[in-house]
Amino acid sequence: MDIDIEKARQVAVAAMKTHPKVLDTPSPEVSVLEIANGMVVLAIRPYTTQADYWDVLFGVQELVKNAWDANGIEAPIPHRVIINK
């Protein structure tokens, strides 16, 4: 599977900005958190007030997932090879 990190980043930022409790300043961010198990893990970072933290945390994850689905960005599926001897 080919992963276009920049496209995933742009779609995620646009999705985060649609949440009414995400602040415009600082702007939401998407960074590569790690490369592990054959996957690129992205950190999505929306900013909000302390009082709205939980609403934004869960709401943004759903918005980003739906936006990625709508734009054909697939989540990686981890694979493991088990060798029995």
Image: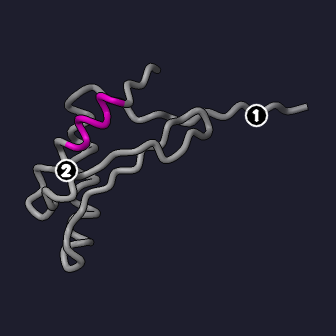
Res 5 quadrant in image: top left
Name the secondary structure under disc 2.
helix
Q: Amino acid at mark 1?
A: Ile
Of badges 1 and 2, nearer the viewer stands 2
Res 9 quadrant in image: top left
Residues rendered magenta in the picture: 6-13
Identify the residue at image location x=14%, y=50%.
Answer: 17
61 sits left or right of 42 in the view? left
Name the secondary structure under disc 1.
loop
Q: Would you say residue 17 sits in the magenta stretch?
A: no
Counting the numbered discs, the total is 2
Q: x, y (%) of residue 28?
A: 24, 52
Mark seen at residue 18: none
Q: Amino acid at mark 2?
A: Met
14 sits left or right of 58 in the view? left
Q: Would you say residue 12 sits in the magenta stretch?
A: yes
Q: Is residue 3 above or below residue 45?
A: above
Residue extending farthest front? 25
Q: Is residue 80 above or below residue 24?
A: above
Q: Which residue is mark 1?
A: 82
Q: x, y (%) of residue 19?
A: 12, 56
Q: x, y (%) of residue 47?
A: 24, 62
Q: Name the quarter where the C terminus is drawn.
A: top right
Q: Earlier in the sequence, mark 1 or mark 2?
A: 2
Q: x, y (%) of residue 63?
A: 20, 49
83 sits left or right of 65 in the view? right
Dot 2: few (<14), some (14–19), or many (≥20) neighbours within 10 Å? many
Identify the residue at image location x=28%, y=63%.
Answer: 57
Dot 1: few (<14), some (14–19), or many (≥20) neighbours within 10 Å? few
Q: Which residue is mark 2?
A: 16
Pick the residue in front: 41 or 82: 41
- Quote the CA–CA distance across marks 1 and 2: 39 Å
